[in-house]
């Protein structure tokens, strides 16, 4: 069963806070390449789809994915739920792991633990970030195509369309959903890339750790920031999940 999981990585160049972030380079390579490399290291992943937009700005992402032998799907920029649905349908994905391209430090071992839990509990949806206990930037979700298809056919709120899985999470009476938690709360740490300070943090982590061990994991980063607490201070002031929070605030303001 575990070999049936398809990772869909969503990526675009037109981020409002840090445009072009996924292709910004560290050690001569774009951040997206580190993410793909780490997702490929997860033994529970059967396939990877790079889901980007039809915008000309995202041609570089599509070309990069194709050159790396990754399945590429191009679809709607704002209706990311539709983009995921059509990508999954095109490549016949039965169990989908959602990963965002702003998580270049994602841990393959954490992903595999999530996969094992998903199948062991026979879930329609599992997440490690609804009630986060891991550093921001190790986020992933897994869900069935059936759940994705149902959400695609019924979701109407802008937040549900832009962020893919809120409809599934908001309807536990329909879907068997669980939030997976780590044994320690590390959610105050920020390893994602949304702002210039985030990129500086990730850049320094990769420059220090990758040359020593390209397969470094979460614990290696934790050890590094224990030795270098100044690194964690680079971006500690930035709020988690600002994009989703903004979408929800906009809906509330406009009565959606």
Image: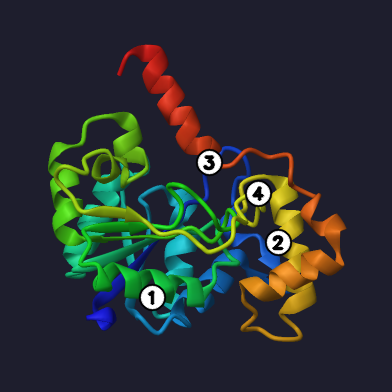
Decide: few, some or many residues near mark 3? Use Cα within 10 Å; few <14, some 14-19, many ≥20.
Answer: few
Which residue lies under the disc numbered 3?
241
Q: Nearer the viewer, residue 63 or 126?
A: 126
Relative to residue 223, is residue 52 drawn left or right?
A: left
Query: Residue 126 versus residue 108: which sits nearer the camera?
Result: 126
* Rendering coords of residue 117 (x, y %): 33, 70
Q: For residue 202, which numbered disc appears in the image?
A: 2
Real-space CA distance between mark 1 and mark 3, rounded to the nearest whole angstrom: 27 Å
**Could you say which disc has been placed on residue 188 in the image?**
4
Label whose residue precedes the other's in the sequence (1 or 4): 1
Q: Earlier in the sequence, mark 2 or mark 4?
A: 4
Which type of secondary structure does the marked residue at label 3 adopt?
loop
Crowding around mark 4 (Cα neighbors within 10 Å: few <14, some 14 to 19, many 20+) is: some
Q: Nearer the viewer, mark 2 or mark 1?
A: 2
Mark in front: 2 vs 3: 3
Indicate which disc, 1 or 3, sits on the residue closer to the N terminus. 1
Q: Label 4, label 3: how many angstroms apart (C-alpha)?
A: 12 Å
Name the residue tied to disc 1.
Answer: 70
Q: Spatial distance from mark 2 to mark 3, Cα to Cα?
A: 17 Å
Residue 28 appears in the figure: no
Which residue is found at the position 22% from the left and 62% from the top? 123
Q: Residue at x 58, y 65 (%)?
A: 104
Q: Which mark is residue 101?
A: none
Local packing at callout 2 (Cα closer than 10 Å; few below 14, some 14-19, many 20+) is: many
Number of the front mark, 2 or 4: 4
> Given contact means CB atoms under 8 Å apart, are the residues at marks 4 and 3 in contact?
no
Mark 2 touching mark 4, by CB under 8 A?
no
Residue 164 picture location, percent across and down: 32, 46
Q: Quadrant of the N terminus?
A: bottom left
Q: Provide residue 135's location: percent of width, then percent of height.
A: 60, 57
């Amino acid at each position: 069963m575990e070999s049936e999981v398809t990772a869909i990585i969503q990526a675009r160049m037109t981020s409002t806070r840090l445009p072009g972030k996924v292709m910004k380079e560290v050690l001569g390579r774009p951040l997206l390449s580190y993410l793909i490399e780490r997702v490929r290291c997860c033994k529970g992943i059967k396939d990877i789809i790079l889901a980007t937009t039809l915008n000309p700005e995202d041609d570089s992402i599509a070309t990069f994915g194709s050159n790396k032998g990754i399945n590429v799907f191009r679809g709607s920029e704002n209706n990311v739920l539709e983009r995921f649905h059509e990508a999954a349908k095109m490549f016949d994905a039965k169990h989908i792991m959602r990963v965002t391209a702003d998580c270049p430090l994602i841990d393959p071992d954490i992903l595999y633990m999530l996969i094992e839990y998903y199948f062991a509990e026979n879930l329609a949806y599992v997440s490690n970030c609804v009630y986060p206990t891991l550093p921001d930037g190790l986020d992933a979700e897994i869900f069935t195509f059936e759940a994705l298809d149902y959400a695609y056919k019924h979701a109407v709120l802008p937040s549900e369309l832009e962020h893919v899985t809120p409809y599934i999470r908001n309807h536990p009476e329909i879907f068997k959903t669980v939030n997976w938690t780590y044994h320690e709360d590390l959610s105050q740490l920020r390893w994602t890339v949304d702002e210039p300070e985030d990129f500086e943090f990730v850049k320094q982590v990769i420059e220090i750790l990758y040359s020593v061990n390209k397969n470094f994991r979460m614990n290696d980063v934790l050890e590094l920031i224990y030795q270098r607490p100044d690194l964690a201070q680079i971006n500690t002031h930035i709020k988690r999940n600002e994009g989703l929070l903004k979408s929800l605030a906009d809906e509330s303001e406009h009565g959606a």
